[in-house]
Amino acid sequence: MRRYGSVLHYLGTILVAFSLLQAAPLLISAIYRETVRFPMRIYVIPAGISLFVGLLLVSLFRSHRLTLGTAMAVGALGWFALSLVGAIPYWLALDVTYLDAFFEATSGFTTTGATLFTGLSLLPKSILLWRGLTEWIGGLGIFTLFLFVMREGGGRHVLISAEAHKAASERFSPGLFSSLRILWSIYAALTLGCSVLLFAEGMSPFDAAVHGLTTVSTGGFSNYDQSIGYFAVAGYPHAASIEYTIIAFMFLGGTSFLIHWHALRRRFAAILRNTELWVWIGILIGAAAIVAIADRGRIADVGLAEYIRSALFHVVSIATTTGFTLRPIDSSWFAPLAKQVLFLLMIVGGCVGSTAGGLKVLRVLLLGKLLRRRLRVIAGSPHEVAPITLNRRLVASGEVERAAAVAIGWAGTLVLVWLAASVGSGLSGWESLSAAVSALGNVGPNYVPSQAFLNIGPGAKVIYILAMVAGRLEILPLLMIFSRRVWR
């Protein structure tokens, strides 16, 4: 019972903190004079619910030292709690079902970026800001939740997720919460820099702010149905510069924040020996080259400069799991080979310790080294010692096992989501597989025609909601809440 109480106490703390975030869309609603058609209760009600339930849980249940399993359960249940409350503004303000609102909120907080809304440019500014803010919260929210919950637990390293373990093992400073402040400072600085550049390149202040939030967080929500392609279609004079800026900041968001910290501290040697970074850059360059070659027939349609920019944009967007597009990736613009490359990028994702989703480059690298070691042992002496090294350091066996466990869990969950969502959805095998990978990898775009995706049934929506949370939490924490050993 103490474990149940601890989980509920920390959930209450998270909900209390979350209630304060409703102030931002309230302010925008007042600035743009939306309070007549979209009254303030749209944001006051969820804030009140979050505050009331949070204070109730904190007062009724006492905190105790968390085990690794219960800490992961707090993280998993926390994402669902935030999404359930965060869906209320959509439900009250728009003509949508609560399930669709829940899907949108979950997509935002998990930085997936898949949307069931259309006519985005006609939505109230406060709703558009709320969509962007959910992604910005979610971008580093997984770090914040895990590190924040540890504050009262006594065991500061008890809550380490597969995504956060790199940042936790190589902290920015000796103090855990000092590291958290540094992390958020870098995150905020990147967001501000992106927004300022987008504004200088011709975006309105509001568009620049929202796209800054959703670019660095690698979320991908846009204020327009055409995503980033809108700015070229609308005739923005600096549309090409906007696209290059977004490419750059998507890359920065998908790169480990430890690399940014090393760069700020001028630790260039640490950057040069970071194997994951160079493999990551190599993947992007190689994938962009293949996509460019596969789609070379389009050069005559748009010109060489726009053609190369388009290939690079979509490769970086999908690889970082941001999901911005210039053209729908399910369209005939992309050759079959290009679509297959983008599909593989959805699986790999970005770097560990970044805001990106996917399996992560570091894990793919470790699994490749594990395979190489096994082949070396088979070919040589069975008694030969073949340690796995990374960045000139020996990788602990637990680290390799963790990577393998996440990969196995990822693959198993993918199969379950693919098969379950295929039942009654009316999608082909390829379409449902791409949607499953997109949801689990927190990517957003997939190879389902947009109208067909809007019309998937309630069952498929629930499955994709679970997949988005599972992918954001890197599988293991979500599985832990179903383990009886965690609650004993």
Image: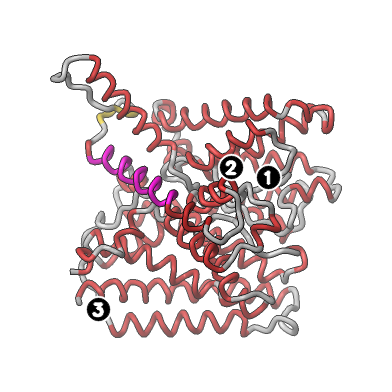
- Residue in the picture at 49% in, 32% down: 280
SS at circle 2: helix
Q: Nearer the viewer, residue 239 or 325?
A: 325
Position in image of residue 74 (x %, y %): 33, 66
Q: Residues within 10 Å of mark 3 (few under 14, many from 20)?
A: some
The relative height of residue 465 versus residue 370 in the rendered view (above or below) is: below
* Mark 1 burial class by Cα count in 10 Å: few <14, some 14-19, many 20+: some
Range drawn in magenta: 398-415
User: In the rendered image, which residue does mark 2 sit on?
Assistant: 318
Give the overall secondary structure of the magenta segment.
Answer: helix
Q: CA distance from mark 3 to mark 2?
A: 43 Å
Does the magenta portion include 406? Answer: yes
Amino acid marked by disc 2: Ile
- Residue 62, label in figure: 3
Q: Residue at x 61, y 52 (%)?
A: 220
Residue 134 lies within the magenta run: no
